[in-house]
Image (cartoon, rainbow, N blue to C red):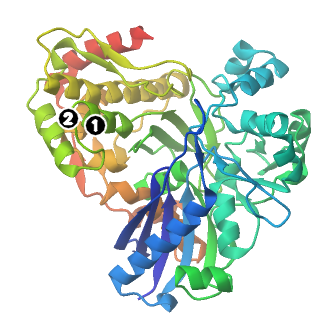
Amino acid sequence: MDHLLAYDVGTSGTKAVLVSLDGQIVATAFAPYPLYYPRPGWAEQDPADWWAAAGIAGRQALAQAGAAPGQVVGLAFATQMLNVVALDAHAQPLGRCISWLDSRADDEARRVMRLLGGPTLFAQVVGATLTGKDLLPKYRWLKRHAPDVYRRAATLVDASGYLLYQATGQLVCEWTCASVTGLFNLKTKTWDRALTRFMGLDPARFPSLAPSTAQVGGLTGGAAAYLSLRPGTPVFAGAGDAMAAAVGSGAVGEGEGHLCLGTSGFAGIMTSRRVTGKRGIATVQSADPGKLLMIGETEMAAACLAWAARELYGGAADDASIYAQMDADVAATPPGADGLLFLPWLYGERCPVADEHVRGGFLNLTPHHTRPHLARAVYEGVAFNLAWILDAMRQYYGRRPDPLRVIGGGARSAAWLQILADVTERRLEVVPQPQIAGAVGAAMLAAVGLGRYPSVEAVKAAIPVSGVVAPEPSQRATYAGLSAAFRQVY
């Protein structure tokens, strides 16, 4: 049987997923790696860790399935975005990757906005103020504060570009990843060279572009040996994690929407319409070459639950028994957590509040609130935030998708799904193994590239629904009042 091998390259590790050509999940594996915090506000990763993890997890998935190298007919990566890897003339990293979590470029973000009329005008035009976590300020930070690295950098790539080079020897930037740089023209699908120069950057440092379903090349001999695959195996461009996950959700038709409950979270809607951003909502290139993705990202979603598991329940963030206990406590606690509100902005926010300095907390805490109340408030706080994003999409763009597909590790929590359905007043459709939707989406992009499907929209037939959660009308009044209060807090 022929298979596709896809990798979801995340912040804490890489998932490798072996998928059949008709979308069936055959095997999965995971390899972790560290995140470094060398200074306050800085976050870095070693690019070599990503490639090492791809080899470890990929070999484990192949062994688990008993698949031979020749049975893998294509591979692709879904990768974390908004990160910078500087490569020298030999395509070797000049240091660690500046992570998407890194906010060292705050001052550069302010400088860029001053160049373009100031924060207020910038937010009116783009939809949100620029922050130190965005790529354009990070590029400028590199040039200003690490001039030797910038001078020696022949190419600036991200996790996707680095891994595609390791696999094929080709330096490219995939469209969806390029679209979050601030330097990609969504209409022409080219680098905006005039804007790049205006920002004081060298266009020659940005590699050639490729759509998600394009074949970048074949596995080199060295890469094939390391991954235990056949030399020449087709490697497809893949997509950024959010855009690959959108494909893996199956919500790929015009106007269809999904929620992602990963470490961070987002609401996304597929659209062919370019719109001006508002309230931190952005329109970026989707993995479908002919469509865009309207997206509102919250910095902390399942990460808030991980915080609660660690700090409220004293367990490890990856301990399934702790989450089972939390789910049980939450299900046994009345909706509204007896008036307790949780603000999920633990690491700043992008949408619906574009403010990297805002912080989270509990509001209305009293002596009679218990640990289950706090846990339920955490679940509900993230739901209120996501509902705010969805309502902004309805208010500003007239889009209200219902049902919503739900993906990400958080979608395994039945208690959280019911809260999300009640708060958003939407029917939720869950896909099988929602925590690997990004890798499944990348695999389906490879399938389109191989000609198995005529278009990205056609892969919907290969993404089944494993469960449906309907909103409970009796909770509408409770959540309407709390949701309104939540939105007044900021």
How packed mark 1 is, by other alpha carbons closer than 10 Å (few <14, some 14-19, many 20 or more), is some
Residue at 27% over, 14% down: 482
Percent from the top left, x then y, of residue 142? 78, 39
Give the farthest residue toward the left.
332
Quarter of the image with the N terminus in it: bottom left
Vertical order, 485 against 444 (above or below): above
Residue 313 is tagged as 2
Vertical order, 287 against 461 (above or below): above
How packed mark 2 is, by other alpha carbons closer than 10 Å (few <14, some 14-19, many 20 or more), is some
Q: Is residue 204 visible?
A: yes
Marks 1 & 2, CB-CB < 8 Å contact: yes
Looking at the rendered structure, the kind of residue marked 1 is: Arg
Looking at the rendered structure, the kind of residue marked 2 is: Tyr
Q: Is residue 444 visible?
A: no
Viewer-nearest residue: 143 or 269: 143
Quarter of the image with the C terminus in it: top left
Residue at 52% over, 77% down: 452
**Residue pointed to by mark 1:** 310
Viewer-nearest residue: 388 or 345: 345
Viewer-nearest residue: 310 or 157: 310
Viewer-nearest residue: 400 or 94: 94
Residue 380 is tagged as none
Q: Position of 341 compared to 155: left or right?
A: left
Q: Secondary structure at mark 1?
A: helix
Q: Position of 168 compared to 455: left or right?
A: right
Q: Position of 306 compared to 177: left or right?
A: left
Percent from the top left, x then y, of residue 27? 35, 74
